């Protein structure tokens, strides 16, 4: 799918906002400092994938299955994103 320049710029802004949020997080800074105090240096690489699709308009949205591992759920929970384990498929 070809996206226009406005959408590309918005996607860049989203990536920048997420990056700045992580960089400015007191929890992240505290954890990094504790790791350094334990004698380690850290290299952090985050991979962000943003998928775009055309807006469906007034059409009824279909439910999609989301397959998450226990590790996926733990990562999301650390990011303060709640996933109901009963709804995890």
Image (cartoon, rainbow, N blue to C red):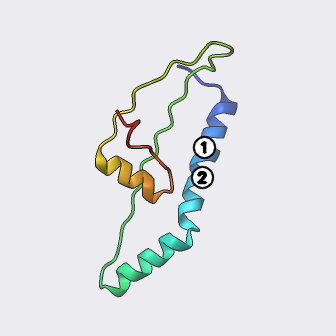
Tell me residue 60's x, y (percent). Answer: 60, 15
Mark 2 — residue?
A: 16
Residue drawn at point x = 44 percent, y = 24 percent: 64
Q: Is residue 12 above or below residue 34?
A: above
Residue drawn at point x = 30 percent, y = 51 percent: 71
Residue 88: which quarter of the image? top left
Tell me residue 58's x, y (percent). Answer: 68, 14
In depth, the one of 34 and 6 nearer the eye is: 34
Mark 1 — residue?
A: 12
Tell me residue 22's x, y (percent). Answer: 53, 62
Q: Is residue 8 above or below residue 32?
A: above
Residue drawn at point x = 30 percent, y = 48 percent: 70
Tell me residue 23's x, y (percent). Answer: 54, 66
Q: Dot 2, how many residues are within 10 Å of its Cα: few (below 14), some (14-19), or many (20+)? A: few
Residue drawn at point x = 59 percent, y = 68 percent: 24
Q: Quadrant of the C terminus?
A: top left
Q: Dot 1, how many residues are within 10 Å of its Cα: few (below 14), some (14-19), or many (20+)? A: few
Question: Dot 2: what SS?
Answer: helix
In depth, the one of 31 and 62 nearer the eye is: 62
**Total number of numbered discs in the rendering:** 2
Q: Is residue 26 left or right of residue 87?
A: right
Cβ atoms at labels 2 and 1 below 8 Å apart: yes
């Amino acid at each position: 799918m070809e996206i226009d320049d406005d959408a590309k710029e918005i996607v860049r802004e989203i990536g920048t906002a997420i990056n700045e949020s992580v960089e400015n997080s007191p929890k992240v800074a505290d954890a990094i400092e504790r790791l350094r105090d334990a004698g380690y240096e850290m290299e952090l690489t985050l991979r962000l994938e943003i998928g775009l699709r055309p807006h469906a308009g007034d059409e009824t949205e279909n439910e999609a299955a989301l397959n998450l591992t226990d590790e996926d759920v733990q990562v999301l929970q650390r990011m303060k994103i709640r996933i109901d384990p009963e709804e995890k498929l």
